[in-house]
Image: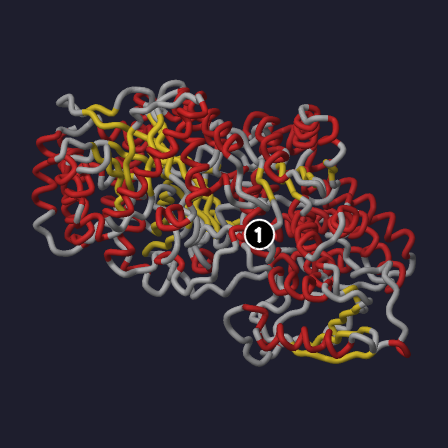
Amino acid sequence: MIGIVIVSHSRKLSDGLKEIADAMSGAPVPIASAGGVDDPENPLGTDGIRILDAIREVMSDEGVLIFADLGSARLNAEMALDLLEPEEQTMVRFCDAPIVEGVLAATVQIAAGGSMEAAMKEARQSVQLEPDAEQPALEPSNSISRSFTIRTLLGLHARPAALLVRKMNAFAGDIRIANTTKGHKTANAKSINSVMLLEVAANDEISISTGPEQAEAVFAAVEDLIKDNFGEEGIAPAKADPASVPSQDQAPAPSGTITQGELSGLSIARGFAIGPIHHVGGALQSAEPVAIENPDAEIERFTKALSEAENQISLAISKAGDNINAHDRKIFDAHISCLRDPDLISAVKTRISSEHICAEAVWREEIVRLSGIYSALEDRLLRERAGDIIDVGRRVLAILSGDQSDDGQMTKPAILAYEELRPSDILSLDHGAVLGICTMLGGETSHAAILASALDIPVVFALGADLASVPEEQSVLLDGSEARIVIDPDENTLAKAEQDRKILKDRLARAEEVRHLPAEMLDGHKVRAAANMASISELEGITASGAEEVGLLRTEFLFMQRDAAPGEDEQYDIYRSIVTGLAGRPLTIRTADIGGDKPVPYLDRPPEDNPNLGWRGIRYSLSMPDFFKTQLAAILRASAHGPVRIMFPLVSTLEEVMAGKAMVRDVMEQLRTRGQSFDAHLEVGLMIEVPAAADLANRFAQEVDFLSIGTNDLTQYMLATDRANPNVRSLYDPLHPAVLHMIAKVIRAAHDEGKWVGMCGTLAGDTGALPLLAGLGLDEFSMPPSGIAEFKLAFCQLRLRECKTLAETVLQLDTASRVREQLALFRQKQLVQA
């Protein structure tokens, strides 16, 4: 199958886009994310070696298609291409299409069995505004049509549309689709872009047309999809009166004037600001459809407005100077691309000519239409692309209308409040006068959020419509650390905020100072600060983080998004690269935990009603000895190059441990026979995730060299709570006394047998729980590398005796809330002592 490589300056964007494409494809299309660079301070950029690894990861006889977001990304991808063998280079193609829309369109086409050329064509058409203009409609005399009503809550958004396209591609003949509710022209039902651009909403009626020889089969396939509601949850209610539905570019109405209290949202940038609030307008301006007499002159005026908008962006970027780094400036390339979009420009010009309506009205309608397509998508990343389109629309409308007043101008320093922050708003900021930024709407992965997170001021998004009810110049406290705004704060609140501000500033500076020092308490007690790792691309960031070792390497990345399991040599090369890169730091490799929430289609596993409780982890590996031995051989061979540990996941019984160890011994003997080197004394351990293993930890500790507690699974299994289920998420709490008692029991049992204990669940990186876990005797804390520095800072301020006293107190408590109260009291005491 054709592979796809996503090359973006942002790892979040490429990873998120891969996740969306995987969900839309419904088939194991090999997709590799090659975004960002391993620099925690400047993560935006592209890495030629990462791109090379991604190309090889998805390479097949059918070739690889590369999508890049910006010019330098394309250059780095071309450098990676030069490192391939000549025969491999001929299999790789670049696709000059918008990265988000292009990847999704190509993925669906590949999943439907399309060729390289078909995938590239579909990607390039991904932002056309008229559906499938070059595809001739079926002759009415040679076609049969049938109408269907779409009842999914969001209509034919990305996932249902992709499912329909795959179904229709199973038929050989031409199939047309029309949105009869909105009166669009017919489109190719086998094209994801054509279907998406029909804007089929909930309760819209569609018409499917095809030749008589396959009509009944086609209609039956569509009926099956509708009966199954396209696999979506929820049926749309009857249509509401359009007059009662707010337009897409309006925020919900505020509840009234608010002069006291607080609002909570999303933290984009930490910090504190106190000052008057200043509301900045940000909605798309209105534009009446005024009749014109000279369409050619109007088109010329429109063309000049586009050119002026592009000049404004370039000038604003230049004036911003060092306030926006080189990587973030590239975000505005997307805005310029929108201003140059031939399909969008053509649609506006065509309507001006045919309808004799002013450019403002036509431009506004097309912008609302295009942004509405993205706003209706289920995925957050794609929805937030609508904000960039609105931003460009506002700029051009201001030029066309002659009203370019900047309502962000201030006469004194203030906290700016927006309905939704746009990237261009950040370009125009007076950095000497802006104390902070807050918004009613917005998400943490939007372009505006990426830019705002780099500002040296607090930023909070998504405070809700009530933000509009805070009076102009009302004094507020903006707390970016707690993601809140306090209206008319009293003296006590202000005093505490000032104290917290100083503490935060000091903590960040001191954390940086101890990043590469040992994790050592005031009384000399030491633990190991380790990093969790899920991909070889994270290696550089881990070595720079201050981590003393890797406490958990999740090996599932080796097996996912490919057509067959990697062989021993391929796995060995990757493990060896990590071991070498760690330069003597120990590497704990968890054997594959296939199944549960990490399905691998090519393994042809049967569906399970409860996959997290099913055939996964050590259970699966032991039942597939060839699969297991291949991985063990690769790990053992890598151990010849540096310190390596083997760790078995999801162990429930002693028999599983004995069988796993026996398999390791068998593979060692095979390697000796083959004359291949390995560390015969490497440590073998297991994860404590299952209550049965925790309860029998003393017996397990007798058989292995170490134990590592996986608090995520242990918590949900202890409390019978699916942590991904929003209806019971409140019950999921790793500080529940029952979970803490199990953790304490595991640590005691291991220490009684002279073995060390680590923790690699989320709780390990919680600095609030750190004193408790240290008091219980945990030896190794493994966490995301970004948390290492603050972990070490918090640890070096503790004394073991006080932590042990805290642990003894906490183990006497009977609710998680009381545990948190005790931890808070301990922190307050530490602050006083400091």
For residue 163, which quarter of the picture? bottom right
Left or right of residue 448, residue 734 in this image: left
Q: Residue furthest front?
A: 673
Left or right of residue 245, residue 115 in this image: right
Q: Nearer the viewer, residue 303 or 652?
A: 652
Left or right of residue 792, residue 800 in this image: left
Q: Nearer the viewer, residue 732 or 447?
A: 732
Q: Is residue 281 at all visible to an observer of this figure? A: no
**In the image, residue 525 above or below residue 558:** above
**In the image, residue 420 above or below residue 455:** below
**Residue located 39% across and 55% down the image:** 615
Q: Nearer the viewer, residue 305 or 620?
A: 620
**How far across and how far down the image is residue 805, in percent?**
7, 38
**In the image, residue 482 above or below residue 780:** below
Q: Is residue 267 at all visible to an observer of this figure? A: yes
**Residue located 56% across and 45% down the image:** 561
Left or right of residue 561, residue 255 in this image: left
Q: Which kind of residue does numbered mark 1 sit on? A: Asp
**How far across and how far down the image is residue 143, in percent?**
85, 76
**How far across and how far down the image is residue 18, in percent?**
57, 46
Which SS class for mark 1? Answer: helix
- On-image quarter of the C terminus: top left
The image's colour scheme reads secondary structure
For residue 316, which quarter of the picture? top right
Total residue callouts: 1
**Residue located 73% across and 62% down the image:** 169
**How far across and how far down the image is residue 712, in percent?**
31, 49
Residue where numbered disc 1 is placed: 22
